Image (cartoon, rainbow, N blue to C red):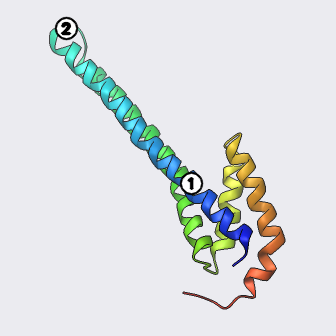
């Protein structure tokens, strides 16, 4: 396995873990927001019941979006670190998707494209490991 393939897998894993930590933080922040509204709403009857659930619902919605963008990083990291035959292709696809996450995702995407362009032919000649 090439050094840059290992480095790219480690960065993808770290980026994916940061997304998962972000999910936990988002759910905690919006959960506290809903708890505050429930507390205030129990003393103030002018707050509608639906409004009390809005922060939690919004937090879950954002957490799902963050999970959809973070889980592919972990999957690509697994493929790269375990030297799976699909790892380089997954790394390229996830790297291209990360280009839109400015600034760190853009740098990671450019590095993923460079690693793919440089080492793809050498990696595909390795024996298939399942």
Q: N-terminal of the two: label 2 or label 1?
A: 1
Viewer-nearest of labels 2 and 1?
Answer: 1
Residue 96 lies, in percent from the top left, at 71, 56
Query: 62 or 35, which is in the foreground?
Result: 35
Determine which of the numbered discs, if any, sits on residue 14 in the image.
1
Q: Is residue 108 above or below residue 120?
A: above
Which quadrant, please, contains the N terminus? bottom right
> Which residue is at 78% across, 61% downward?
113
> To which residue does mark 2 refer?
44
Q: Which class describes the residues within 10 Å of circle 1: few (<14), some (14-19), or many (20+)? A: some
Element carrying mark 2: loop
Q: Residue at x 55, y 69 (%)?
A: 78
In the rendering, at what x and y percent does residue 66 appear? 50, 45
For the C terminus, the quadrant is bottom right
Task: Tell me what residue is drawn at x 65 percent, y 59 percent.
Answer: 94
* Between 1 and 91, the one nearer to me in the picture: 1
Say whether residue 13 is left or right of residue 99. left
Rendered view: 33 above or below 47: below
Crowd class of label 2 (few under 14; some 14 to 19; many from 20; radius 10 Å): few
Which image quarter: residue 38?
Answer: top left
């Amino acid at each position: 396995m090439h050094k840059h393939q290992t480095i790219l897998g480690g960065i993808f894993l770290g980026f994916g873990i940061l997304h998962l930590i972000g999910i936990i933080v988002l759910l905690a922040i919006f959960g506290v927001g809903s708890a505050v509204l429930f507390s205030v709403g129990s003393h103030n009857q002018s707050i509608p019941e639906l409004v009390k659930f809005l922060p939690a619902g919004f937090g879950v919605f954002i957490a799902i979006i963050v999970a959809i963008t973070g889980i592919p990083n972990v999957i690509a990291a697994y493929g790269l670190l375990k030297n799976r035959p699909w790892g380089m292709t997954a790394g390229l696809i996830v790297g291209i998707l990360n280009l839109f996450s400015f600034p760190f995702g853009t740098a990671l995407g450019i590095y993923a494209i460079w690693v793919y362009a440089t080492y793809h032919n050498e990696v595909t000649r390795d024996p298939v490991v399942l």
